[in-house]
Each structure stands twice: as structure tokens, then as C-alpha cells.
């Protein structure tokens, strides 16, 4: 059974995700100071405010007067707040506020590990691969990339989604639409990441 998460803010989802990851790695919950440091909060009160909200919404229980007194309550799933980048500056995706247009809330079970962000597709060059204009592609910067994978790449400063093939003469970026030509690049090229998923809002 899936648990509705619409009642959580983006920041609350991020904190809840951090708590789960911390417990998974260390075997015990973080302190208020560790949460404050991780999210660069200016005071412990800011952390306590978010934790109180999570407690009221049933996602954790706080034990007073204990340094690591956070008890996570199990949920069927925890959606992750995936940042949607409006641009990819200087060839490297920057997950900074000025580059983020919004967030997609997706079940963490659908995504593998790694640094994942989303980009909105423009154009129809990948239409025959099922990627339509207006779709959001989920891009993993940490995934290994092989021939035939769908990737996001920057060519001459412009972002593109294509099939990736490494040839002796250089890199080929192949479309999935007969109206578009294969791109062959040897320079001014940056491989951003591998497309690992697709999100589409139905009209």
C-alpha cells in the first residue's frame, strides 16, 4: 500500500530522506546538530520545527532529553524530491536554487542510487523511443554509460537527449526520429548523465 506524501513540504521530504539514509549507514539516528550542519540551518530551532512537523504527520517519534532520540516510523514508501533543472550551466549540472525550476516527488523504489535530477524535454528527436516533448527525463550522473544507452549531453553548450555510441572516429549521438540527423562530435562535448527514467504528466 502506497502512503500519500502530499502533506509534506519539499524540505520535510529532504530531511526525512536524510534521516533514513543516516540510520541505514550508521545504525542510529543523527543528532539535531548533525541535521543542522547537513542542511546549513542557522539554528537548532529550525531543525526542531521541521522534526515537530514530521512527528505530527506520523513519520517519526522524538524522545525528549536524548541526544539521538529520533525514532523513524516505517512507511510503505518515501518519495524523493527530485530537482528539475532549468539549465545546465558550464557543462556541469549544478543543483543550486537558481538552476532549479521545481521538484518531482517520486517513489525512491523506482530509482537506483546516485545523483539524480530531471530535465524537461524540448523537441521530438526521441519521439520513436517514447520520449515526447514536455516529458521529464530522470538523469543519473553516477551511472556508467554503454553504447545504446540514452543520455543527456551538452554539445556546443546546448543540452540534448540522444542514444549514445562511442566510435573510433568519436562520439555519435543518434536520434529516434527519422527527421533528425545523427550528431557526430569530437570536441565541445560533455556527457551529463544517463537517462534512467521518464516522468509524464497526463493532460
Image (spheres, grey):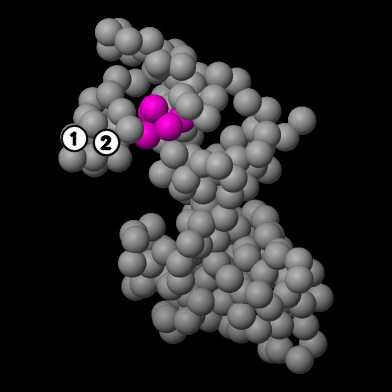
* Numbered disc 2: secondary structure: helix
* Other residues around mark 1 within 10 Å, as few (<14) / some (14–19) / many (≥20): few
Residue 121 x %, y % = 62, 74
* Other residues around mark 2 within 10 Å, as few (<14) / some (14–19) / many (≥20): few
Which residue is drawn at the image coordinates 66% and 39% (left, top)? 4
Q: Which residues are magenta?
A: 50-54
* Numbered disc 1: secondary structure: loop
Which residue is drawn at the image coordinates 57% and 76% (left, top)? 160
Q: CA distance from mark 2 to mark 1?
A: 6 Å
Which residue is drawn at the image coordinates 71% and 82% (left, top)? 124
Q: Is residue 119 above or below residue 157?
A: above
Which one is nearer the viewer's eye here, 38 or 111?
A: 38
Residue 113 x %, y % = 55, 40
Q: Are marks 2 and 1 in contact (CB under 8 Å)?
A: yes
Quadrant housing the N terminus? top right
Q: Is residue 177 covered in magenta?
A: no
Which residue is drawn at the image coordinates 30% and 40% (left, top)? 39
What label sits on residue 43 in the rendered view?
A: 1
Dominant secondary-structure state across the stretch colored magenta: helix
Seen in the image, is 65 located left or right of residue 118? left
Amino acid at each position: 500500500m502506497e502512503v500519500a506524501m502530499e502533506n509534506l513540504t519539499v524540505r520535510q521530504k529532504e530531511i526525512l530522506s536524510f534521516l533514513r539514509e543516516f540510520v541505514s549507514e550508521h545504525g542510529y539516528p543523527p543528532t539535531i546538530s548533525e541535521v543542522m550542519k547537513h542542511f546549513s540551518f542557522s539554528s537548532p530551532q529550525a531543525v526542531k520545527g521541521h522534526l515537530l512537523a514530521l512527528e505530527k504527520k506520523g513519520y517519526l517519534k522524538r524522545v525528549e532529553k536524548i541526544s539521538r532520540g529520533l525514532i523513524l516510523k516505517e512507511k510503505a514508501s518515501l518519495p524523493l524530491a527530485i530537482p528539475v533543472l532549468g539549465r545546465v550551466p558550464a557543462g556541469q549540472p549544478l543543483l543550486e536554487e537558481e538552476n532549479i525550476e521545481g521538484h518531482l516527488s517520486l517513489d525512491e523504489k523506482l530509482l537506483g542510487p546516485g545523483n539524480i535530477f530531471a530535465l524537461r524535454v524540448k523537441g521530438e528527436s526521441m519521439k520513436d523511443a517514447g520520449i515526447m516533448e514536455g516529458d521529464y527525463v530522470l538523469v543519473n550522473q553516477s551511472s556508467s554509460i554503454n553504447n545504446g544507452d540514452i543520455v543527456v549531453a551538452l554539445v556546443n553548450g546546448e543540452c540534448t537527449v540522444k542514444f549514445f555510441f562511442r566510435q573510433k572516429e568519436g562520439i555519435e549521438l543518434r536520434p529516434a526520429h527519422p527527421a533528425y540527423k545523427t550528431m557526430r562530435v569530437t570536441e565541445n562535448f560533455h556527457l551529463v548523465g544517463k537517462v534512467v527514467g521518464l516522468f509524464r504528466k497526463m493532460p
